[in-house]
Structure formats: C-alpha cells, structure tokens
Amino acid sequence: MNRLGFGGWTILVLAAVFFGVPLVMTAAFSLWEGGDRYGWSAYRILLASPQLFNSMALSIELALATVAAVLVLLLPAMIFMNLYAPRLRPLFEFVAALPFVVPAIALVAGLSALVTGPEWLIGTPFYLVIPYFFLALPYAYRAIDVGLRSIDLPTLTEAGQSLGAGMGQIIHLVVLPSLRTALVGSTLLTLAVVFGEFTFANVLLFHTYAVYINEIGQHEATAAAALSVASFLLTWAAMLGVLLVGRGRITEGS
Amino acid sequence: MPKAPIAWLFIGAFLAFCAFFLAAPAVMLMVQSVDGDDGLTLQYFAALGDYRYRVAFSHSLSLSFTSATVGVIAGGLIAFAVLKPDAPRWLRAVVTSFSAVAANFAGVPLAFAFIATLGSLGLLTSMLKSIGIDLYAIGFSLFSISGLTLVYSYFQIPLMVIIITPAIRAMRPSWREAAENLGASSGQYWRLVGLPVLAPSLLAAWILLFGNSFSAYATAYALTSGNIGLVTTEISAVLSGNVVSEPGVGAALSVGMIVTMVVVLAISQMLARRASAWVKG
Amino acid sequence: MATVEIHGVRKSYAGREVLAQLDLAMTDGELICLLGPSGCGKTTLLRIIAGFIQPDVGTVVVGGQDVTKLSASERRMGMVFQSYSLFPNMTALDNVRFGPRVAGRPKPEQLKRATDLLDLVGLAAHAGKFPHQLSGGQQQRVALARALAVQPQVLLLDEPLSALDAKVRVQLRDEIRRIQRETGVTTVLVTHDQEEALSIADRVAVMNGGRVLQVASPATIYRVPADGFVARFIGSGAVLAGVADAGRVRMGALMLPATAATAHAAGQHVELFVRPEHVRLEAMNGHIPPGALAADVRETVFLGALTRIRVALREADGEVWADLPSEHAEAFKPGSPVLARWDEAAPRVMKRLM
C-alpha cells in the first residue's frame, strides 16, 4: 500500500477529506428535522412540490434544445469548414474561444441591451437557448474538433467518393458514425453545463432548476441541501454516462 | 466554391449566428459604455472608480488569482500522485470520475452544500464548536473572500486534475530514468526537466482556472446574496435594477471584465511563448 | 572503464520468474550483446545493471565493487534508451552537458565536454537544436553523447536502434562500434535483432526464459550453437528430427549424413541442424548416389546475389533450404526433382528438446 510513497498518500488523504466532508455533511444535514430528529421530511417536501418537477422539466427541455442547436448549427459548419474551407479554421477557433473572454454575465448584459424584442422571442424560456449555445460552444467545439482531427476527414471523403458515394451519403454513413464518441461526449457535456446554469435564467427571470434550488434555499435550508445532494448524484450519473460511452475520453474537452 | 453551396450555407449560418448573438452584444456593450445622453462620454468608466466597484474588481481579481493558484497546485499534485506508474488502477478511476463530477458541480448546489457544512449553522461548524473550536469567533466566515476561495477550490481543483492529466501522461518515464542515470537527484530532475516541460501546460491551465473563477456568478450569488461584491454580482445588480445605477455602468463593468480577460490572455501568451521555445511548431 | 560481473541474479514479478539464477562476466572494454526474443529477460537484466530494478537475490559487481545497493544515480553508468529519452526542453548541447551540470562541474568544463562529445558523434553543427528538430538517428546520437558525458564506467544501450529506419540503423550501428572502440568503455547492448548483435558485439549472450543459454563470439554462436534454441534463433537453417545411428541420423527410412551424431548414443532422439550455405543441389538424372537425398523444389526466394531454395525430402517428412548463387539457381523451378547433399561434417546434431 505504500507504492505511492508517503507524500502521495498524504495528498490523496487530504483531498479525500476536503472533497468528502462537505458531501457527507450535506447529506446528513438534508436528513435533519430540527432538534435531534432525523428523517426524510426534506425529501418529502420536495417530492410534493410541483415546482420542482416543472423547473426540472424546463431545464431538461432547454438542455435538449441546446444540444439540438449544437448539432444543427455547429456540427455541420465544422464538418464543412474542415472539408471545404480549412482557411477559416483560425476564425472558428477564435469564435469558439470568445465565450471564454466574454463572461456569461457580460453576454447577458449585452444581449438584453441589444435584443429588446420581439416578444415571441424574448418572452419564451427558449430564448435562453441562444446564450446556452455560447456557454456550451467552447466545450462542444473542443470535443468535436478532437473527434474530427482523429478521423482524417479529407481521406475518408475521398475514399467515399471513389466508391461512388454522394456527399450526403458520406456524411451520413461515414463521418457521423466515426464521430459518435465525440458527439456523445459533447452532448453530455452540453447537458451538464446547461442543466446547472443559473446566471442567464436568474437574470432573465426564467424558472429553471437552478433558479428553483436557489429560491427554495432562501427559506428551506434542509430541502436545499437535499437538492444539492440530488444534483451531485445526477451530475455523477451523467458523467458516468460519458465515461462509459466515451471510454474515458471525457478528459478532453472538459 | 460552386461544388457545395450547402456547405457555405451552414458555415455562413453558424458565423452569422455568432456574429449577431455573440459579437454584436459584446460590441453593443462597448457602445453603451461610452454612449451618454449628449454623445460620447467617459462618465460610466469614471464610475468604475467608485469605492463599490473598485472593491468588486479587487475581490474578483484576488479570488480568481488565489483560487486558480490553489487549484493549479493542489490539482497538479493530486493528478501527479494518481498518475504515478505504480498507483493502483482503481484509484485512478475513482479520482478521474469524481473530478469530472466535481468540476461541473458549481453554482447554487455547491453553495448550499457548503452552507450546510461550514455556514454559521452548518454541521461541521457545530461539531467543531462542540469540541471547543468556534470557527466564526476566530475570524473565519464562509461568506468572505477566503470562504469563497475555499468553495471555489471545490470545482477548481477537480477541473485542474482533468485538464492537466493529458500533459502529465505525456511525460515520458525515460526522461526521469535518463536524469537519474546521469546522476541527477529528484529535485534536480524537477527543476531542470519536469517543471520546464510542464510549464506551458501549467500556464494554460492556470489561465483557464482564472477565467473560470472570474466569470463565475452563481456560486457567489447563492452564497453571499450579493453581500460580497464581485464584478459579476455587481453587473447582475445593475441588470435587475437592485441598485440605482444606469445601464451604462453595467456595460462599463462588462467591458472591464472583457478587457481584464484579454489582458490576462495576452500576458499568458507572452509567457507561454517564452516557456515553450522548445515546443514543436 | 571496468569489468562487470553478475552473480546469481534472480528476479520475479508477481510469482512469475523473469530472471532465473543468472551469471554473466564481462571483461574491461568489451562490447557484449544481450540477444533474445521479447520477454526473455534481457531488458530486465540491463535495468538491474543500471540500478532501476533491484534483483531479488544476487549481486552486481562493477570494477570489483559491489554496486547492488547503490541507486541508479550513484552508479556512474551511461544509458541510451529506445527512443524519445532526450529532454525536450533542452538543446542538444544542454542535453549532453546535463550529467556534468548536475554533478556540479564548472560551466566551461561542462561546455567543453559536451562540445567534444557532439563532435565525436558528428553533430557539432546541430548543438543548438531542440530534440524535435533532429531526426531519429540524430536524437540517438545525442543520447549516446549524453550518456558518455558522465565518463561512465559502463555504457548501457537498450534497443537503441529499434525505432530507426533500416538504413539509419546500419549507419548508427557502425558508429556505435567505432565510438565504443575509441572510448574503450565497457558496453552492454540489448537487442532482439540477431544481425545487429552478430555484427557489433565482441561476445553475444543469447537469452531465453530468464536464462543465458550461451555466451560466445558471434562466429561461435553461429557455427557452434550450444543448443536447439540457439541454433533455431540464430541464422536460418533446417531442423530435422531423428534418431542417432553411429555417424548418421536415421529419419524414417532415410539415413542423413552427420559425423556429429557419433557424440550421441545410438538410438538417442536427436535433432540435426543444417544451414542453407552447406546444402548443395544438383539436377536429378534417375539414380540416387550414396550420400545424396532425393527431393522436390517447393519454392525459390530471390535474395540478390543468392537465391534461397526450399526443397522437400521425398523419403521423409522434412524440408531443407539451400543457398545458391543466383545465376546457378535458374535451373531449379518449383516442382522439379533434385538431389540434395551436404558435407557430413557440416550439420550440428543435438539432443532433442522435449
């Protein structure tokens, strides 16, 4: 057991304490019912609240819509850029890095100053998909880029063409299947990012899951703790999905 | 290229979307930040000199600087310990998957987890109190910059573990063996080979962590309800009308953030070029 | 410069024995090759000499001093790794002066030594380049110079050529030989390439299954292999299983000429090894003279100056190879009947490995 050396074990034990204690404490706290009584009442309150499910459903819908936006708007553009316009790569790289330089809160400030209508756009929660797309852009771009680089797109396309396939067939039959891992990875990362997003929704006054946790935390501390534990487990489930489907390739892109 | 008009349609749509909803808002902020009632004005940027905003910037910068540095050091050490060639396999799997979760566990849930643990009524706080250690009496507060740094470390350290792992994996065992074989001590190896080789990756990771913390909003908002001013919470206060200030001030604050990130990136690019003279390309 | 002695070294990993009670002695200034298939323990042995691995039992003695307990950094050995072992953040010159630098030599001395050694390996013009700007062969030359910069008692080379192109490999092989002669440093080279071992070494140690099977000069290893494994592993040749019968080996109905069979009791199960250069072929014209074997050509392989012909014996289940000058090989087409013979003193006869 001392193959890591004394230093290695010290570091890992300290890390385990730092990361483990808040989780255990939060889980314990979520079971507290005042005084020295413990029980599941916080979880019962949550499950009885229709708001929880409404907000969760909204967050899931938004996450899926964002994934769709990534697949429709970003993925084809990246494939075609690699095939027909590799000179545009620096521009794409710049655009993908831009959300990193423009913090979410600044983007939301700019957006609300610039876009003041029409009501059918900014009045619906799906307006959030626009900023969410940019929130996910750096992660999704990186994951897809890693995937595209690993498959040598021009050669695959030439091979497909020499066998008589049209461009549509090549993309459908050759390119997308070989990008499967990258797409699954970027999809789950997008889901995780969007699901926990608070900034845009809070400022633009939409009732997503994260906003709901914040609200409930103002007056129901144990319920908030219960939701935090649940969120951690949900994120874990999503990440395990990435690890299993992507066979450990999550290390890139996130 | 006449061969693939549809390709240009998709590329064009993506770029137009980014131009309109990403670049244009950024430009809009810049316009708004200098657009007074009677033409150009610097009054909004002048307002950044107010005590309130000076504090917010210094809070944001010191929080980002500290949490990025803590994250790089602690995360780097953890990743290194776990990636030692004879470290048990299960340990690696546990740390990798936990890091992936914890790095994404930012925002409101994280804040509540820490309030439940180390808040003034938190479980750990009460437990320590019952054995005679009163954290809040000796100056600790979760709702201070040092408290925020502690909370931010919870996602910064795992993020570091994830992004530095490929770089540590790329270190070849034969470098270490060659150094040892040539008579170098472990310290000499790290000073002359290990750290210089890792330097560009460490720098890039630090920048990423800095930006991650600088633009974070949800954690701080849920934890302090705006009592500790950060640039992000100040912007949100302006946007939601919680403070009496003009939108121009919010725009100026946002431009200030963008400029800060650009400056940090520029400095890191300069350092990176010096640190990676030997890198391919 | 020093002698190296390995005494009774044994090493196991998780119950699997990698080195079994191994002894080996090297004289001062000698170049010895550890040759064997992958997994034979040759790299483990090299790393034990270097000090990266501790043996379970046994000692490593260098220049009369027991170094078994010394760490790798205290042993003053220069090692060249398979590939990519140069420090990527240092120029060729800085790589070479690394050893003197960590030993705290004055800087002018470091630079002088590094420049001299880069000169020795023919890379003085590339001193300022980073590893990624050098070709694979150049990188290995720098690695060699770096290993020599510590004035090692022993130079250790771990498959230094295996990652290089065939042509560069031969050039660098000759270069290593030249430099080893010039510096006179005792050298251990690990390789799985028998041609490399035979062409470069003073002596070759053939290893298999954690044991040294034979240590001898390249010529002896080739001509007088100690056992069936060495005979099969080194060079090419036919293996015919039979029973010793005075000055011959009986294989079914056939009697194969081999004086070496007299060393074995009649009736003993043996193997006969005959190399392609010892087998002669002639066209068959009906009768079979004594000492000749009837056979049919199966396949011909053009090798340049020589053509290698595979023939199947008619009276027994066996094949032999014959190397003929290419201009004489035209006559032997696949399917044609031939007579095969060899000088009865040529084959090796060894007890059959069970």
Image (cartoon, coloured by chain):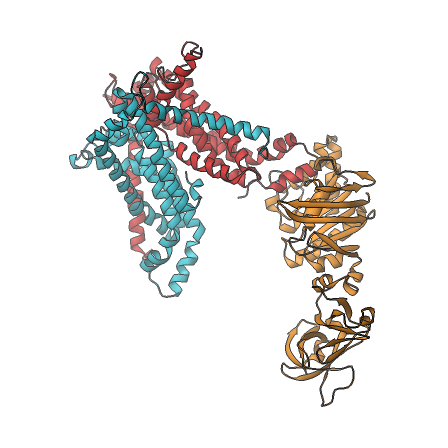
**x and y percentages locating residue C9 in the rendered image:** 74, 45
Is residue B116 or residue A42 the one in the foreground?
A42
In the image, which lettered chain appears orange? C
**x and y percentages locating residue B140 in the rendered image:** 42, 14
In the image, which lettered chain appears cyan? A
Locate residue A121 relative to residue C100 in the image: left or right. Answer: left
Q: Quadrant of residue C272?
A: bottom right
Total numbered badges shown on the rendered structure: 0
- Judge whether residue A110 can be spotted in this image: no
Is residue B255 or residue A137 the one in the foreground?
A137
Is residue B194 or residue A213 the one in the foreground?
A213
| The furthest residue to the front | C267
In the image, which lettered chain appears red? B
Is C237 located above or below residue C32 in the figure?
Answer: below
Q: Quadrant of residue A217?
A: top left
**x and y percentages locating residue B234 in the rendered image:** 31, 20
| The furthest residue to the bottom | C286
- Judge whether residue B170 can be spotted in this image: yes
Q: Quadrant of residue C62?
A: top right
Locate residue B26 relative to residue B77 in the image: left or right. Answer: left
Residue pictured at 22% horizontal, 28% vertical: A205
Q: Is the C terminus of chain A in the top left, top right, bottom left or bottom right quadrant?
A: top left
